[in-house]
């Protein structure tokens, strides 16, 4: 990127930025470059000026992410609070930008008398992250609501795509190569006024009662295997409370690994491997990681 071009950008560029500041686990080595665009137009300009071979990583709230202790080579693009449009269009569809928190989307839909998005209140991340992994909670799934999505490519071009353009599965979405989510349009039904707010309250109470929300974690560590729950299998192996370094299996919810203070990514990764090994040894079930692991191990 030429200096003159970079000067025209309006976002914030940081060098050697600790990713521990930007993940819910409070873990992670430095990113070579960390860019927070001013808006979508600025993001498009930034992408268009990047070198073709520059590795790119997109970040929301970092709530489903383990960044290794060696950090990330290349550029991290942070969309949280930037791609934050949240509005209804003339057809009554709700457009949510990738940088809006899922909780805010849930509250917006409730205020506008729309149903089926309440479960988003239980997802501690951005809507872009929910789109990227087909996030779900309390029986609801993100892509059950989505009609169209907006993406942006490496050249800064924006695309409107229907859900048919994506290969959507359980906790995974295959997006066209070299594109990332900017936002999406959801189709929701009207509901009895006020009932959405009560439903969100109930779901949050349920989350607070069953999950260790007062400790840094990344939510569910493993996907639920077909017909079962990862937490049940882990607890049945007697693994609640087991630790490697400062990373521990939560006493409150066995499918959460918590940072008890100063945990390293290698601690978490080793604990995940140990838990998966124990569950496989006892039940013959292969646990699949729900958490995304990125970056380099520390030399």
Image (cartoon, helix red, strand yellow):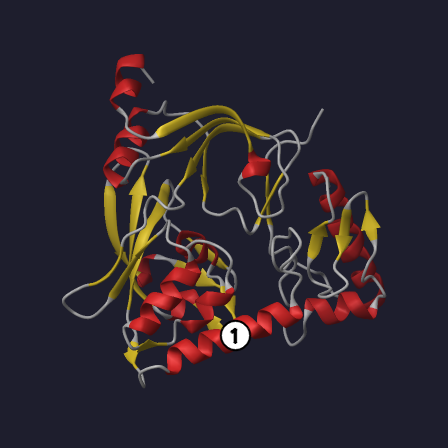
The crowd level at tag 1 (other Cα within 10 Å; few <14, some 14-19, many 20+) is some
* Location of mark 1 (residue): 203
Decide: is 30 above or below 280. Answer: above
Place of residue 295 in the rendered image (x, y in percent of width and height, measured from the top left): 59, 34
Q: Is label 1 in a helix, a strand or a loop?
A: helix
- Furthest toward the left, the residue is 90
Decide: is 68 above or below 124. Answer: above
Residue at point 26%, 14% (across, down): 4
For this rendering, which residue is in front, 200 or 190? 200
For this rendering, which residue is in front, 173 or 234? 234
- Furthest toward the bottom, the residue is 192
Place of residue 25 in the rendered image (x, y in percent of width and height, measured from the top left): 63, 46
Q: Give the mark count.
A: 1
Which quarter of the figure is the C terminus placed in?
top right
Which quarter of the figure is the N terminus placed in?
top left
For this rendering, which residue is in front, 53 or 58? 58
Decide: is 255 above or below 115. Answer: above
Is residue 91 something that shows in the picture? yes
Place of residue 169 in the rendered image (x, y in percent of width and height, measured from the top left): 48, 63
Is residue 284 something that shows in the picture? no
Place of residue 175 in the rendered image (x, y in percent of width and height, measured from the top left): 39, 51
Residue at point 69%, 67% (across, down): 230
Residue at point 49%, 48% (across, down): 61
């Amino acid at each position: 990127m030429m200096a003159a071009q970079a000067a025209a950008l309006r976002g914030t560029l940081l060098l050697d930025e600790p990713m521990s500041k930007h993940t819910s686990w409070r873990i992670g080595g430095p990113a070579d470059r960390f860019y927070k665009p001013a808006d979508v137009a600025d993001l498009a300009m930034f992408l268009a000026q990047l070198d073709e071979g520059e590795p790119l990583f997109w970040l929301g709230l970092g709530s489903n992410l383990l960044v290794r202790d060696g950090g990330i080579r290349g550029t991290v693009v942070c969309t949280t609070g930037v791609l934050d449009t949240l509005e209804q269009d003339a057809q009554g569809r709700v457009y949510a930008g990738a940088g809006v928190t899922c909780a805010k989307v849930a509250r917006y839909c409730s205020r506008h008398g729309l149903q089926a998005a309440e479960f988003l209140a239980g997802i501690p991340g951005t809507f872009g992250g929910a789109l990227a992994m087909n996030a779900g909670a309390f029986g609801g799934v993100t892509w059950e609501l989505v009609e169209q999505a907006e993406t942006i490519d490496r050249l800064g071009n924006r695309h409107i795509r229907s859900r048919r353009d994506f290969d959507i599965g359980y906790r995974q979405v295959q997006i066209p190569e070299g594109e990332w989510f900017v936002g999406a349009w959801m189709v929701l039904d009207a509901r009895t006024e006020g009932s959405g707010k009560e439903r969100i309250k109930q779901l949050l109470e349920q989350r607070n009662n069953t999950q260790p929300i007062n400790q840094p974690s990344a939510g569910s560590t493993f996907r639920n295997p077909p017909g079962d729950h990862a937490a049940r299998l882990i607890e049945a192996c007697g693994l609640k409370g087991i630790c490697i370094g400062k990373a521990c299996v939560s006493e409150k919810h066995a499918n959460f690994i918590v940072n008890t203070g100063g945990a390293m990514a290698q601690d978490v990764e080793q604990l995940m491997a140990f838990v998966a090994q124990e569950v496989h040894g006892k039940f013959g079930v292969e646990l699949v990681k729900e958490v995304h692991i990125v970056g380099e191990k520390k030399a």
